[in-house]
Image (spheres, rainbow, N blue to C red):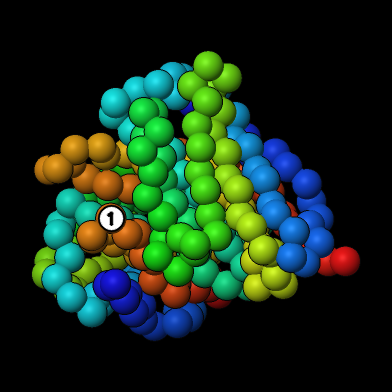
């Protein structure tokens, strides 16, 4: 089973700043199978990015994804107050989905 | 617009079984383009994938839960269901149903539509 590690655990930034979130896999992950989700407090997760870098419908272009192999990054440019949330990466391999432990983004 | 809605008991006794249903509206459940599935989240914890099912009934599960879980689908009712046996306190969580985009090799695989979740407590 592929294990995902996310860093940092918590990121505290001011509005307008850039957030850089890391997701590292214990093995190679196919680009098609790497996604990012946002979960605001009390809400269900929603997909932000799929296929490493494709934005889901309705997601602002300040969210972007990059990476390959086992290292992936979610970047949020120009943080807004509503971006305060936990962000999870997800991968699929050998018929199993796994999620990372999440990075909490706090807007000061 | 596709919507998913979980339903089931809020409380389950230890050692008993959990049965949840996800009702799909605003779109077809009988489609070759998607899978349907369950994800859970223990209090204050991250997301754990439970399993997926295709419209034809073929299912696959998280290896850590495989011995205790069954997912089924009823396309005539636009519903799919989760059954988890031998519940313990460790199974207390918010259970989400979700649609999985991607059914073929070469497509991206991710959960594109989620239900609001249902909170399950395990208590005698």
Q: Position of residue A38 (x, y in %)?
A: 45, 57
Residue in the picture at 14% in, 43% down: B105
Q: Nearer the viewer, residue B43 or A82?
A: B43
Residue in the picture at 65% in, 43% down: B20
Name the image quarter holding residue A97.
bottom left
Mark 1, Cα crowd under 10 Å, few <14 / some 14-19 / many 20+, is few
Q: Nearer the viewer, residue A3 or B60?
A: B60
Name the image quarter holding residue B19.
top right
Q: Classify residue A22 as left or right of residue B66.
A: left
Q: Position of residue B101 (x, y in %)?
A: 32, 39
Quadrant for the C terminus of chain B, please. bottom right
Please state the chain letter of the residue tagged with numbered disc 1 in the rendered image. A
Secondary structure beneath label 1: loop
Q: Position of residue A55 (x, y in %)?
A: 28, 46
Total count of labels: 1
Residue in the picture at 29% in, 26% down: B32
Q: Is residue B44 above or below residue B69?
A: below
**Residue denoted by label 1:** A95
């Amino acid at each position: 089973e592929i294990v995902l590690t996310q860093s940092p655990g918590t990121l505290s930034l001011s509005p307008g700043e850039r957030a850089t979130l890391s997701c590292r896999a214990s093995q190679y992950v196919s680009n098609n199978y790497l996604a990012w989700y946002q979960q605001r407090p009390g809400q269900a997760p929603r997909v932000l990015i799929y296929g490493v870098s494709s934005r889901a419908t309705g997601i602002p272009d300040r969210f972007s994804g990059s990476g390959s192999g086992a290292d992936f990054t979610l970047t949020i440019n120009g943080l807004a107050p509503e971006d305060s949330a936990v962000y999870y990466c997800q991968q699929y391999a050998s018929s199993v989905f796994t999620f990372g432990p999440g990075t909490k983004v706090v807007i000061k | 617009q596709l919507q998913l809605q979980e339903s089931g008991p809020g409380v389950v006794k230890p050692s008993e079984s959990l049965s949840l249903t996800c009702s799909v509206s605003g779109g077809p459940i009988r489609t070759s383009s998607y899978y349907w599935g369950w994800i859970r989240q223990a209090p204050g914890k991250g997301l754990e994938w439970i399993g997926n099912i295709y419209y034809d009934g073929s299912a696959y599960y998280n290896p850590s839960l495989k011995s205790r879980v069954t997912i089924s689908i009823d396309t005539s009712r636009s519903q799919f269901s989760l059954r988890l046996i031998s519940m313990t306190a460790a199974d207390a969580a918010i259970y989400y149903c979700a649609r999985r985009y991607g059914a073929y090799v070469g497509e991206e695989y991710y959960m594109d539509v989620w239900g609001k979740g249902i909170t399950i407590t395990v208590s005698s």
